[in-house]
Amino acid sequence: GPQSDPIANKPDFGSLEVYYQTVHRAEGGGYSASGAEALVRWRHSQRGLLTPASFIPVAEEGGLIDALGFWVLREACRAACKWPENTFVAVNVSPAQLRRPNFAEEVFAVLQESGLPPSRLELELTESSLIEDNSDVYTVLKSLRSQGVQISLDDFGTGFSCLSHLLRFDIDRIKIDRSFVSQLGTKANGAAIIGAIVALSRNLGISTTAEGVETEYQRDFLAALGCTDLQGYFFSKPVPLCDLDSFRTAES
Ligand code: G
Ligand code: G
Ligand code: MN
Ligand code: NA
């Protein structure tokens, strides 16, 4: 059934790979990497490297998303253990995963096994995870945060009733959707909306990551607004772990 051990029932994930896209923070005149987001890929023998849009919905419908999600989580935690201590790894979580009553305990087990401190893990939820008025989800999030796991709201501004989610759930970070960032420098609306989200977040004590930063203009504009972190092709595309140069230490 859906509540059985997702790891024991793990299908063969041999052709899945985790890519990482760095997240950057203004520091001492530069922009150093503060963390990275794990983004799953499927290396298909005939069709090449597939992005999640082509297989995540299938995994969700076929009941494989729990197993896939835990596989990505484990890979990401193991990888992040070798990065500098002040960095985080962000992992995307599907709504179905969050509906598992034991989800928090399962995450703690992966953290313990990998040795990654909970505060270095950030779980990215979409607003659709929070839409159903589900007290289990509330309990799961509370439990995760009580151990120091960070919770972020992905694609912020594109879903429904986002402000009521901020009222009901304690969130550590908002990820500003790239549709707003892409308007910077071309349309006034994007700047106004991002300014409002950043101001709101600061007042609530929530961090912000702007996604889809592609130009120097966008970087400078977002930094001036007080956006906490920046992510996008301007800094780096998602890359395989072996190409993640930002976190490489002298010995590795
Ligand atoms: O990787 P890409 O750059 O194409 O990402 C597309 C979408 O796939 C994003 O919305 C991202 O949140 C989602 N995604 C990427 N990796 C994972 C994953 O491991 N689990 C889930 N549930 N979604 C993921
Ligand atoms: O989880 P999320 O929905 O935020 O997924 C991030 C998606 O955004 C991935 O598909 C990733 O490849 C993509 N992405 C990351 N940076 C950029 C960027 O600067 N521009 C564009 N167009 N897409 C980006
Ligand atoms: Mn994401
Ligand atoms: Na996003």
Image (cartoon, grey):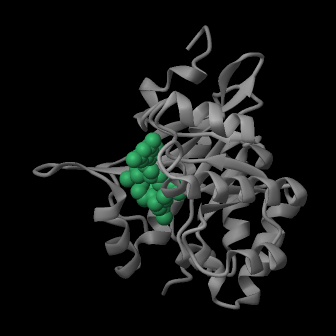
| Between 165 and 2, the one nearer to me in the picture | 165
Q: Position of residue 156 (x, y in %)?
A: 61, 64
Q: Residue at x 79, y 47 (%)?
A: 119
User: For the point 57% across and 58% down, which residue is it?
Assistant: 189
Q: Nearer the viewer, residue 203 or 31?
A: 203
Q: Is residue 156 above or below residue 28?
A: below
- Residue 76: horizontal and vertical position, in percent? 56, 44
Q: Can the viewer see residue 7?
A: yes
**Picture quadrant of residue 103:** bottom right
On screen, residue 81 above or below 246: below
Residue 205 horizontal side relative to residue 219, left or right: right
Quadrant position of the C terminus in the picture: top right
Residue found 73% across the figure and 16% down from its top: 29
At x 63%, y 30%, the residue is 220
Is residue 18 in view from this perspective? no
Q: Quadrant of residue 129?
A: bottom right
Relative vertical location of residue 127 with respect to residue 232 in this rendering, above or below: below
Please identify the quarter of the rendering in which residue 54 is found.
bottom left
Residue 245's x, y, as percent?
51, 20
Q: Is residue 92 left or right of residue 148?
A: left
